Amino acid sequence: MKRHNFSAGPCVLPQEVLAKSAQAVLDFDNGLSLVEISHRSKAFVDVMEHARALALELLGLEGMGYKALFLQGGASTQFLAVALNLLEKRAAYLNTGTWSDKAIKEAQIFDDVTEVASSKDANYNYIPKGYDIPSDHDYFHCTSNNTIFGTQIKDFPECDIPMVCDMSSDIFSRTIDFSKFDLIYAGAQKNMGPAGTTLVVVREDVLGKVSRKIPSMMDYKVHISKGSMFNTPPVFPVYTSMLNLEWLKNKGGIAAIEKENEKKAQLIYSEIDLNPLFDGFAAKADRSTMNATFTLANDDLKDSFDSMCLEAGINGLNGHRSVGGYRASMYNALTLESVQVLVEIMSELERKA
Ligand SMILES: *Cc1c(COP(=O)(O)O)cnc(C)c1O
C-alpha cells in the first residue's frame, strides 16, 4: 500500500533519491559500498564538494563570501556552536517555541541573553512582531519555522547586527533573501535528507571575532579550513542530502518547490477553516507552509478519524505533546496527492458525523 508520510522529522524523501542512495550502499565505487570507502577517496571528496556547492547555489549565495559545511551533532549542537563562535558580550534571541527556547538555554551558558520578544504567553501560537533588536549585541538569533507549533516567520526583521537563523524545518522550501543572514543552520532530517548531518552556511567574515578559545570540533573556522572533513564526515547522510539537493535543482530549485508547497498548504488550511470539526492551532497570519497544526473540535471523533487515517496509509500525523491534536508536515518531497488524501478523509469525517 502507498504510504503518505506526514512525519515531522525524519522526513519523507523522494523515492528516486532513496533508490539511488540504497544502491550506493551496495555499490558506489567499483564494487565498494559508499559506507566502506575512504572519505578521503576522490569519489567521496567529490560528493562532499558537490553537496557544499549545491547548497550555496540553491540558496543563491555563491560567490558572496559564504561557506557551506556538513557537520554532525544535529541542530542541537549548533545552539551551542553559534554561541561559542559569535558570542562575546551579549546576544539577542527571539523566542518562538521549544527550539528557540533550547537555543537560548545554550547561549545562557556563557552569559545572560536578551530575549527581544516571546510568544510563550500563548503557547507559541503566533510570531511576535514589532520588537527592537539592540544594535550593541553580538548577533540576533531566530527560528524561521517552528516545527512543533506550526508557525513561520514570513517577514524577517531588519537587523544591523549579524543575523543567525535556525532553518531546520523550512530550508530549501521557500524563496527568501538568504543573504540577509550571516549564519544559517539546519538539521538535515526535516527537509534536506536523513538524520546524521547538519548544514551550516556561514559568512566567513563574521568569524574569528571572539576572544575565547574554541574547541576544534566546535570551531567553524577549523571545519572551513578542512573542507568540512576535519574528522570523518557522515558519508551516508551527506550523500543522500546531495542527491536530494540535485532532485530539487532538477525540479527548478526553491522557486519551483515553493509553488508546490504553497498549493499543499492552501489545500490543508482551507479544509481546516471550512470543516467545523477541526480547529487550526497557529494564528492565521503566521501559519507554516511546512507543518500544519490542528485539533479536533470534538475528541469523541478521534478514534474514527485515526482509523480512517490508518486505513488510507497516512503516517506521522500525531501532534507534538506540547500542542496535542494533529500535525501534518508537508516537506518538499510530500506530494500534493498525499495532502488530497488527508483532506478527503477530513471531509468524509464531516459527512459521516
Ligand atoms: C528538529 C529541530 C531541531 C533539532 O534538531 P536535531 O538535529 O535533532 O538536533 C532544531 N530546530 C528546529 C527548528 C527543529 O525543527
Image (tube, helix red, strand yellow):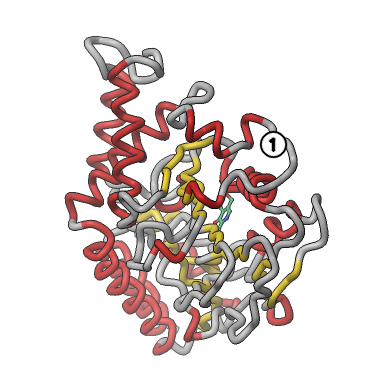
| Residue nearest the viewer, comparing 10 with 87 | 87
Asked which secondary structure carries label 1, the reply is loop
Percent position of residue 242, x then y: 32, 38
Residue appearing at x 35%, y 62% in the figure:
173
- Residue 105 lies, with reference to residue 346, above or below; the image says above
Percent position of residue 323, x then y: 63, 70
Residue appearing at x 77%, y 63% in the figure:
113
Would you say the beta carbon of the disc 1 residue lies within 8 angstroms of ligand 1? no
Percent position of residue 259, x then y: 25, 70
> Do we see residue 27 in this rendering?
yes
Please tell me in which quadrant of the rendered image residue 160 appears: bottom right
Specify the quadrant that holds the C terminus.
bottom left
**From the viewer's perspective, is 252 left or right of 193?**
left
Report the number of numbered marks: 1
Residue appearing at x 25%, y 32% in the figure:
20
Percent position of residue 43, x then y: 28, 20
Please tell me in which quadrant of the rendered image residue 94 appears: bottom right
Residue appearing at x 64%, y 75% in the figure:
133
- Residue 44 lies, with reference to residue 286, above or below; the image says above
Name the residue tied to disc 1: 214
Identity of the amino acid at label 1? Ile
